[in-house]
């Protein structure tokens, strides 16, 4: 299952972000800022890899980056 399959088909609300952060499913979940319509950028760390996801109306949640952490 892809990471984005666990997300709703819209930007996250603050309470959903908090739930994702405390779920224990990922090593860390952070965002860029608090946009008025919900969180539409996520940085999800799994082990030594950080995945960047972005939400748009056209594509839904999609990966737009991946980097190895030192």
Image (spheres, rainbow, N blue to C red):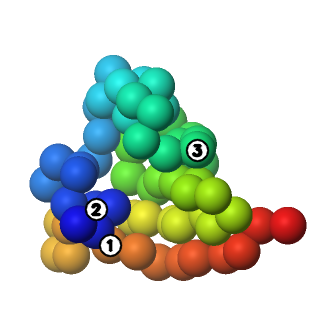
Q: Does the rendering let one see residue 18?
A: yes
Please give left or right for residue 49 compared with residue 61 in the image. right
Residue 24 sits above or below residue 42 on the image? above
Q: Nearer the viewer, residue 32 or 70?
A: 70
Q: CA distance from mark 3 to mark 2?
A: 16 Å
Q: Residues within 10 Å of mark 2 (few under 14, many from 20)?
A: some
List x then y, in percent, for residue 48.
69, 64
List x then y, in percent, for residue 23.
40, 30
SS at circle 2: helix
Of pointers 3 and 2, the one earlier in the residue sequence: 2
Q: Residue at x 28, y 62 (%)?
A: 4
List x then y, in percent, for residue 12.
30, 40
- Check contact, mark 1 vs mark 2: CB within 8 A: yes
Q: Which mark is residue 27?
A: 3
The quadrant the C terminus occupies is bottom right
Residue 69 sits above or below residue 17 on the image? below
Q: CA distance from mark 1 to mark 2?
A: 7 Å
- Check contact, mark 1 vs mark 3: CB within 8 A: no
Residue 48 sits above or below residue 37 on the image? below
Residue assigned mark 1? 62
Q: Residue at x 52, y 66 (%)?
A: 52
Mark in front: 1 vs 3: 3
Please give left or right for residue 33 compared with residue 35 in the image. right
Q: Nearer the viewer, residue 48 or 33?
A: 48
């Amino acid at each position: 299952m892809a990471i984005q399959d666990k997300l709703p088909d819209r930007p996250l609300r603050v309470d959903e972000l908090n739930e994702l952060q405390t779920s224990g499913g990922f090593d860390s979940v952070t965002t860029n800022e608090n946009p008025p319509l919900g969180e539409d950028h996520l940085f999800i760390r799994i082990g030594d890899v950080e995945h960047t996801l972005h939400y748009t109306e056209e594509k839904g949640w999609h990966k737009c980056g991946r980097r190895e952490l030192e």
